Amino acid sequence: MFAKACLLAALSLASVSAFAAECETTVDSTDTMTFSTDEITVSKQCKTFTVHLTHSGGLPAQVMGHNWVLSKADDAVPISTDGMDGGFENAYLKPGDTRVIAHTKLIGAGETDSVTFDVSQLDPAQAYTFFCSYPAHISRMKGTLKVIPG
Ligand code: CO
Protein backbone atom coordinates (compact mmCIF):
# COMPACT_ATOMS: atom_id res chain seq x y z
CA MET A 1 0.00 0.00 0.00
CA PHE A 2 2.76 2.41 1.01
CA ALA A 3 4.85 1.38 -1.98
CA LYS A 4 1.92 2.07 -4.28
CA ALA A 5 1.48 5.55 -2.80
CA CYS A 6 5.17 6.24 -3.36
CA LEU A 7 4.92 5.08 -6.94
CA LEU A 8 1.94 7.36 -7.56
CA ALA A 9 3.81 10.28 -6.00
CA ALA A 10 6.81 9.55 -8.23
CA LEU A 11 4.56 9.39 -11.29
CA SER A 12 3.01 12.74 -10.36
CA LEU A 13 6.44 14.32 -10.04
CA ALA A 14 7.45 12.84 -13.38
CA SER A 15 4.39 14.40 -14.99
CA VAL A 16 5.22 17.82 -13.58
CA SER A 17 8.80 17.76 -14.84
CA ALA A 18 7.64 16.36 -18.18
CA PHE A 19 5.31 19.30 -18.58
CA ALA A 20 8.18 21.70 -18.03
CA ALA A 21 10.32 19.95 -20.62
CA GLU A 22 7.36 19.60 -22.99
CA CYS A 23 9.08 16.77 -24.86
CA GLU A 24 7.45 13.93 -22.97
CA THR A 25 4.13 13.15 -21.36
CA THR A 26 2.46 10.44 -19.32
CA VAL A 27 -0.83 8.93 -20.41
CA ASP A 28 -2.72 6.71 -17.99
CA SER A 29 -5.17 4.04 -19.09
CA THR A 30 -7.93 2.38 -17.07
CA ASP A 31 -10.24 -0.62 -16.70
CA THR A 32 -13.04 1.46 -18.23
CA MET A 33 -11.30 1.84 -21.61
CA THR A 34 -10.14 5.42 -21.17
CA PHE A 35 -6.96 7.40 -21.64
CA SER A 36 -6.30 10.21 -19.15
CA THR A 37 -6.08 12.71 -22.00
CA ASP A 38 -7.65 13.19 -25.42
CA GLU A 39 -5.14 15.73 -26.68
CA ILE A 40 -1.34 15.82 -26.74
CA THR A 41 0.62 18.78 -28.10
CA VAL A 42 4.09 18.23 -29.52
CA SER A 43 6.40 21.14 -30.21
CA LYS A 44 8.68 21.03 -33.23
CA GLN A 45 11.34 22.39 -30.86
CA CYS A 46 11.57 18.85 -29.47
CA LYS A 47 13.95 16.57 -31.36
CA THR A 48 12.16 13.56 -29.98
CA PHE A 49 8.98 13.12 -27.98
CA THR A 50 8.34 10.39 -25.44
CA VAL A 51 5.01 9.00 -24.28
CA HIS A 52 4.93 7.02 -21.04
CA LEU A 53 1.88 4.76 -20.89
CA THR A 54 0.59 3.54 -17.52
CA HIS A 55 -2.37 1.31 -16.62
CA SER A 56 -3.98 2.16 -13.29
CA GLY A 57 -6.70 -0.48 -13.53
CA GLY A 58 -6.82 -3.98 -12.11
CA LEU A 59 -7.29 -6.15 -15.21
CA PRO A 60 -4.60 -8.02 -17.16
CA ALA A 61 -3.59 -7.23 -20.74
CA GLN A 62 -5.48 -10.25 -22.10
CA VAL A 63 -8.86 -8.77 -21.13
CA MET A 64 -8.17 -5.02 -20.80
CA GLY A 65 -4.97 -4.48 -22.74
CA HIS A 66 -3.93 -1.00 -23.76
CA ASN A 67 -1.27 0.37 -26.05
CA TRP A 68 -0.61 3.86 -27.34
CA VAL A 69 -0.46 3.95 -31.12
CA LEU A 70 0.22 7.05 -33.22
CA SER A 71 -0.79 7.47 -36.85
CA LYS A 72 -2.16 10.00 -39.29
CA ALA A 73 -5.82 10.63 -38.38
CA ASP A 74 -7.19 8.88 -41.48
CA ASP A 75 -5.10 5.75 -40.83
CA ALA A 76 -6.26 5.10 -37.26
CA VAL A 77 -9.43 3.09 -37.95
CA PRO A 78 -7.88 1.01 -40.78
CA ILE A 79 -4.86 0.21 -38.56
CA SER A 80 -7.19 -0.81 -35.73
CA THR A 81 -9.28 -3.01 -38.04
CA ASP A 82 -6.24 -4.71 -39.59
CA GLY A 83 -4.69 -5.09 -36.13
CA MET A 84 -7.35 -7.57 -35.03
CA ASP A 85 -5.74 -10.16 -37.32
CA GLY A 86 -2.39 -9.51 -35.63
CA GLY A 87 -3.83 -10.91 -32.42
CA PHE A 88 -2.67 -10.57 -28.85
CA GLU A 89 0.88 -11.77 -29.60
CA ASN A 90 1.35 -8.83 -31.98
CA ALA A 91 -0.32 -6.32 -29.65
CA TYR A 92 -3.26 -6.15 -32.08
CA LEU A 93 -1.18 -4.53 -34.79
CA LYS A 94 -0.53 -5.96 -38.23
CA PRO A 95 3.17 -6.86 -38.20
CA GLY A 96 5.19 -4.35 -40.23
CA ASP A 97 2.29 -1.90 -40.62
CA THR A 98 4.09 1.14 -42.06
CA ARG A 99 1.14 3.41 -41.27
CA VAL A 100 2.04 3.14 -37.57
CA ILE A 101 4.28 6.07 -36.67
CA ALA A 102 4.97 4.94 -33.10
CA HIS A 103 3.53 2.54 -30.57
CA THR A 104 4.09 1.18 -27.11
CA LYS A 105 3.66 -2.47 -26.25
CA LEU A 106 0.29 -3.73 -25.02
CA ILE A 107 0.15 -3.47 -21.22
CA GLY A 108 -2.10 -4.65 -18.42
CA ALA A 109 -2.79 -3.37 -14.92
CA GLY A 110 0.26 -2.08 -13.09
CA GLU A 111 2.48 -2.24 -16.15
CA THR A 112 4.11 0.66 -17.97
CA ASP A 113 5.80 1.16 -21.31
CA SER A 114 7.30 4.13 -23.10
CA VAL A 115 7.85 5.03 -26.72
CA THR A 116 10.07 7.75 -28.15
CA PHE A 117 9.63 9.02 -31.68
CA ASP A 118 11.36 11.49 -33.96
CA VAL A 119 9.48 14.82 -34.12
CA SER A 120 11.08 15.88 -37.43
CA GLN A 121 8.89 13.36 -39.29
CA LEU A 122 5.72 15.09 -38.05
CA ASP A 123 4.03 17.82 -40.10
CA PRO A 124 2.13 20.63 -38.30
CA ALA A 125 -0.32 20.69 -41.23
CA GLN A 126 -1.19 17.00 -40.72
CA ALA A 127 -3.82 15.72 -38.29
CA TYR A 128 -2.60 12.85 -36.09
CA THR A 129 -4.55 10.45 -33.91
CA PHE A 130 -3.39 8.34 -30.99
CA PHE A 131 -5.42 5.32 -29.99
CA CYS A 132 -5.44 1.87 -28.40
CA SER A 133 -5.46 -0.95 -30.96
CA TYR A 134 -6.96 -3.61 -28.66
CA PRO A 135 -10.14 -4.73 -30.47
CA ALA A 136 -12.93 -2.13 -30.21
CA HIS A 137 -11.01 0.09 -27.80
CA ILE A 138 -10.55 2.82 -30.41
CA SER A 139 -14.22 3.71 -29.91
CA ARG A 140 -13.33 5.20 -26.50
CA MET A 141 -9.55 5.28 -26.42
CA LYS A 142 -8.47 7.86 -28.94
CA GLY A 143 -7.25 11.43 -29.03
CA THR A 144 -5.62 14.08 -31.13
CA LEU A 145 -1.90 14.71 -31.34
CA LYS A 146 -1.25 18.28 -32.39
CA VAL A 147 2.09 19.38 -33.77
CA ILE A 148 2.95 23.04 -33.25
CA PRO A 149 5.86 24.92 -34.84
CA GLY A 150 7.25 26.49 -31.66
CO1 CO B 1 -7.09 -0.66 -24.77
Image (cartoon, rainbow, N blue to C red):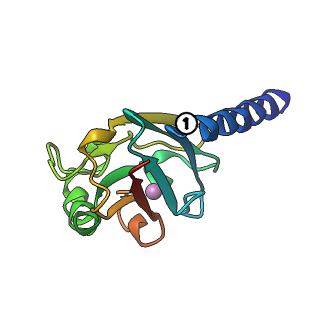
The N terminus lies in quadrant: top right
Q: How many marks?
A: 1
Which residue: 79% across, 27% down? 3
Q: Is residue 81 above or below residue 109?
A: below
Residue 66 in view of the camera: no
Question: Does the rendering let one see residue 31?
Answer: yes
Query: What kind of residue is marked 1?
Result: Glu
The quarter holding residue 46 reads top left
Q: Compared with residue 121, is residue 79 higher up or lower down, i.e. above or below? A: below
Q: Residue 81 in the image: state x and y as whole percent.
A: 23, 66
Residue designated by label 1: 111
Secondary structure under the numbered disc 1 in the rendered image? loop
Residue at coordinates 24% horizontally, 56% vertically from top-left? 83
Quadrant assignment, res 34: bottom right
Question: Residue at coordinates 41% horizontally, 58% vertically from top-left?
Answer: 146
Q: Residue furthest front?
A: 150
Question: Hey, which quadrant is residue 139 in on the image?
Answer: bottom left
Position in image of residue 26 (x %, y %): 57, 43
- 117, 75: nearer the viewer: 117
Identify the residue at horizontal 32%, vertical 57% (top origin): 124
Q: Residue furthest bottom?
A: 139
Left or right: residue 85 compared with residue 106: left
Label 1 residue near ligand 1, CB within 8 Å: no
| Image quarter where ligand 1 lies | bottom left
Neighbour tally class for label 1: few under 14, some 14-19, many 20 plus, Cα within 10 Å: some
The percent position of residue 114, horizontal first and vertical second, equals 45, 34
